[in-house]
Image: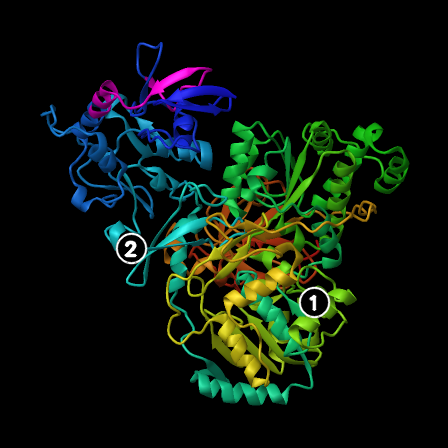
Amino acid sequence: MVSVTIDGQALEVEAGSTVLMAAERLGIAIPTFCYWKRLPPLASCRMCLVEIDGLRRLQPSCATTVTEGMVVRTNTPMIDETRSSMLDMLLANHPLDCPICDKGGECELQDMVMAYGPRKSEFHDPKRVFHSEDLRLSPVVIMNVNRCIQCQRCVRMCEEVVGAVALGTVEKGMDTAVTGFEGSLASCDQCGNCIEVCPVGALMSFPYRYKARPWDLVETDTVCPHCGTGCQLTVGTRKGEFMRVRSKWDEGVNHETLCVRGRFGLDFVSGRDRIERPMIRRNGALAPVSWDEAADYLGRRLSAVEDKAAAGLASPRLPNEVLYQFQKLMRTVFRTNNIDCSSRWSVPFDTLGPLLAAFYSRAPLDEVIANDCVFVVGGNVTEENPVTEYLLRDGARRRQTALLMLSARPSRLEADACAVVRVPPGGETAALAAVVAGLVAAAGHALPGEALADIEATVGRPPVDTGRDGPSRLASALNESRSVSVLVSVELLRASAARQTLQQLNNLLQVLRLLGKGPAMQFLFDRANQLGAWDMGVLPADLPGSWTLSHDTARTTLARNWRTEIAPPSGAGLDAILELCLGGGMGALYLAGADPLIAYPDRDFVMRALGAADLLIVQDTFLTDTAGLAEVVLPAAGYGEESGTFTNNEGRIQKIRKFREPAFEARGNLAIFDFVAALRSKTLQPSTEGGIFDEIARQVPAYQGLTQDGLGADGAFTKAVPFQPSGAFFAPPLVAQTAGGLMLITGNCLFHNGYLSERSEILNTVADDPYVEMSGQDAAQLGFSHGDQVVVRSALGELTAKLKVNRRFPKGLVFIPENYRALRLNRLMRRGVYPCPVEVYKLKTSVAPLTGSTSSPEDRHQGMGGDLPDDPQSHLGQ
């Protein structure tokens, strides 16, 4: 610690602190333009100059490190004169168009001039003008270069935090101008963080332009509904209409940054295909009815099917309170444990549950990535969890964290990694097993002697690794690190080898724990409340709090609280539920916010299964594909229309707040559960959001002691429940013989998350059309060029989209984003087979098909030097 005196106030600060940081701790405001907390100091604006005893010249407080005994003054006549002069220079060329500038009312330059500026300018020359009209750099970013004060925040934010390097400067001195490549931001992330940090109206949001003033807006702090990072954001509405999103520096995991989905993708709340009224199926078509009519019809139908099995599926985008009440409704009113919370996979929770209990770190991501080494397994963090990528980049560049990556699909973050291992699609399991074996071999002497022999006998010897960045490089880096964090892509859960992958993760974490490296593990979920859904017990074999149904004490405690008996046998997960439907045993199938028809593998199978249920009830905000098959459709409030909480990847529980009224005749999800329960002559108590939260805090161990009032601006962290790992190790998987050919994987693209964001008109202006991505090597071998229309064919179906050549892709990998409803991507997938074998052909016709069109086998195609055969099965397996 070092002592410093600022404006007569003494303070001790950590060594390396700047004068500006010390002044902030004392509550002393020093004006800045170029300084930003997420960025290294630049000291170019000269607004933060201060006097320091012993130094003849004023010093920039943002870049001056405190030394022992330093005496600083921040408010003297010389400083005031200097600040006034700097502002006079800025105003000399700044256009005085505040009445029409979108930044009016929240402009830092306005604030600085009011506080420190001159009352009369000495500059009388004509103002510099770069352009007479604003420049549209992208669909969402528009620029008035004349207003720029050259603070460079936007350029540095883009390069050093986001990693996109889409903005730069041209010319020098007062003629310096910020711009994109050739005056365009076509290749950038469109995240809008440059708009957020711009202190003036130089960079502006085009969708928000001229729509409102800050004082017109009603602002609501809430949480992003897209991925599981859980960014905090502030929604601005005007007369109940959504206007914009901004973020705040000192709140949440994101520290003011947002990705394109969070900043520009919330207009989906006004999507056009809202369900306006309840609907029931009449003469084969859905017909709108009143809530009373829906009650009469649904009550009769529920009575008719009550002797058969029931099941429920809920979306992990719903709030904790809704998810908790849903599983309670299914268990107490429908008397079933056939419950699941994902419409994209069936999780091997018997393996996942113990792994989560033993190793999942419910801690700030800032702390998790502060370990010596961070190992990212699977997926593409750049596109799945962009703001998490920003934090990881910051850790690698500023904290010198060793970043290790293992995946089939490359990401931009790899430029900051110490070691990268590229595996073939589905090869993560074998690579993890090799890393574990290599780690045991490298650190064998440090492992407990009594355990070493058993571990070596189980995990085997490491394979021969000749690559510089192969698994042995990862094992060596893990062994050399003092502390390790493991971040796991949720993509691995959909793979056929998900169970084996989780077993190898368990092996790795147990070895790291035995080596004293204090491993921390978190999933990188791509749904806003996936961890919360698991915590709430929306699972066939687990109660809230991850207690198994076979746990007599937990089951008895809940039964006493709920005043009803809970059946002990485990229920069916989604796959088994669909099989039960096809077998004719399903009475009522109740879906809350879930759309398996578009998301679950094998669309034809899902359609037949849903059609075979006696009664399909869909409770949703939008008319989804699954809702189109339902017998009863109930319009539910959407995001922003009801309050509650989300639990993000960190285990941080945060408030989501209502900022608009439910549209049309939609009701809150909790009110609809009460409505359905009443039709079965039951009641759910408590039934309010606050009462349910209190019950969760009593019944779920990780949430015990939490209160709604205690969820401050940063939320609160749930607790990791002490759980001793079993100590068992799993043998490495058998190495399957690869048949070669192309393997299809899917996930989210940068501009979309699931199918929800496709309802955002703004995101659809920046997102590419549906595309097929493959390596340059494969494209060259097949005679394809970037932008060609290609056909992707599997054993079950085919689709058509344009080709995107990615020269960083490994050979054999094909990627299609799961975000485009028109593609019906899941019709290519077979249940239990992932990655999916496919063939790719060039469309022969010179007329491009409709975007995302589904081609029939009669269409003529070209690929591999010839025509695609008419028989869709004839080339498969070759």
Q: Position of residue 452 (x, y in %)?
A: 87, 35
Relative side of 727 to 39, left or right: right
Q: Judge by depth and name the residue closer to the eye, 397 or 543.
A: 543
Is residue 868 at least partly visible in the picture? no
The residue at which mark 2 appears reads as 217
Q: Position of residue 270 (x, y in %)?
A: 37, 64
Per the model, the C-alpha gap separating discs 1 and 2 is: 44 Å
* 434 in magenta: no
Q: Amino acid at mark 2?
A: Leu
Mark toward the viewer: 1 or 2: 2
Residue 14 vs residue 434, the one in the foreground:
14
Which residue is most to the left? 124
| Mark 1 residue type | Pro
Query: What residue is shown at x 56% (from left), y 85% (from top)?
Result: 679
The residue singled out by tag 1 in the image is 540
Q: Mark 2: which secondary structure?
A: loop
Is residue 456 visible to us here? yes
Residue 871 position in % (x across, y down): 63, 64
The residue that appears at 44% across and 24% down in the rendered structure is: 11
Horizontal arrangement in the rendering, residue 564 relative to residue 639 (left or right) = right
The way the protein has been coloured in the rendering is: rainbow
